[in-house]
Amino acid sequence: GSSIAGSTTHGAAYYQRSIMMRIAVLSAAAFMLCGNSLKVEQKAMAAINPIRKVVTLLQKMQKQVEKEGAKEKELYDKFMCYCKNGASDLGSSISAAEDKISGLPSEITGAEAKLVQLKEDTKKATVERTAAKNEIAKAKAMRAKEAAAFASQKAEDDSNLAAAKKAIAALEKGVSSGFLQTKAAATLRSFISDGMPHVVEADREALASFLSSTQDTRQVHDLEILGILKQMADSMAADLAEINAAEEAAIKTYDELMAAKKAEVEALTASLESKIKRIGELGVAIVEMKEDL
């Protein structure tokens, strides 16, 4: 405060001395010009009055001095305004800087602890995302294997059921002998030789005898075979419906798992990107805070 007041007094005194010196210079110049003009008047009366020239010159000089004085006053006022306001602003800046510096050590400690935690969280999220991706890959491989097994089983069951239905139709029409020469009969023979689920041994033997007989040698009555075939076809149709339902359930479970795991991977990826960005920003902030100490 005292330095600003001193600067103000000194500036005012300087401004007054500057004006006084310029007036003195102008007065001396006027006096000299007046003395010279008297001599000129004595030598050349016909010449233009030199006093007028001096007055005109002094008037111009006065205007120039006033103009420069006004400019200096404007600069002086601006300087004084800066001195009054700048000191307050500077004081506030210094106080804020001191407060900031006093709190930097604790801020640095907190930021470094946060950085360590972020790095640990990043490692954990990376491991979790890798595990989720591995589960997706395993689920895809298992689903592909299950789908292939289902397709193979369904194709076989469809073929056997179709053969049984053809045999039933042939028996109902009384043309069983013609049927025994068809590809469907060969399919049934293979099915019987590989084992027939849901068919007792006696019925299996009766079917085997029917499929290997001819019109002249067949000993088993067609009605009995027809009953066995219908029962077998019903069981085969039920089995086929069951494996179809199981496949549909497996597909649904797989789709739900894929959706959940993909959402998990996406969430972990977003979290990782955010954490990595935060780690970079926090690292820069720590370096800047240490430089400010």
Image: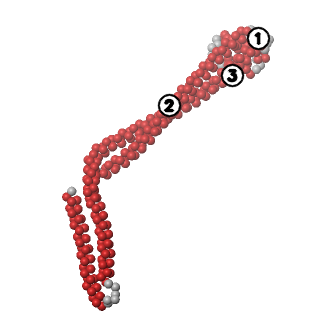
Q: Nearer the viewer, residue 161 or 249?
A: 249
279 to the left or right of 225: left
- Residue 235 visible to an observer of this rendering: yes
Q: Amino acid at mark 3?
A: Ser
The answer to whether the residue labelled 2 contacts the one labelled 1, judged by CB atoms less than 8 Å apart, is no
In the picture, the quarter occupied by the N terminus is bottom left
Up-down relation of residue 110 to residue 192 (above or below): below
Mark with earlier residue (2, 3): 3
Residue 182, given in percent of the width and then of the height, sits at 76, 20
Percent of width and height locating residue 67: 32, 69
Q: Is disc 1 placed on a helix, strand or loop?
A: loop
Q: Which mark is residue 260?
A: 2
Please tell me whether residue 91 is drawn above or below residue 190 in the rendered image: below
In this view, 118 is above or below 216: below
Q: Residue furthest right?
A: 216
Say left or right for 33 vs 270: left
- Label 2 to label 1: alpha-carbon separation: 61 Å
Dot placed on the residue nearer the N-terminal end, 2 or 1? 1
Mark 1 residue type: Arg
Instruction: Name the residue carrying label 1.
Output: 218
At a point 27% along the width and 77% down the height, the residue shown is 26
* Between marks 2 and 1 in the image, the one whose residue lies nearer the viewer: 2
Query: Which element type, helix, strand or loop, lies under badge 3?
Result: helix
Decide if residue 284 is on the left or right side of residue 214.
left
Alpha carbon distance from label 1 to label 3: 25 Å
The percent position of residue 259, horizontal first and vertical second, equals 52, 31
SS state under label 2 = helix
Seen at 23% across and 70% down, the residue is 17
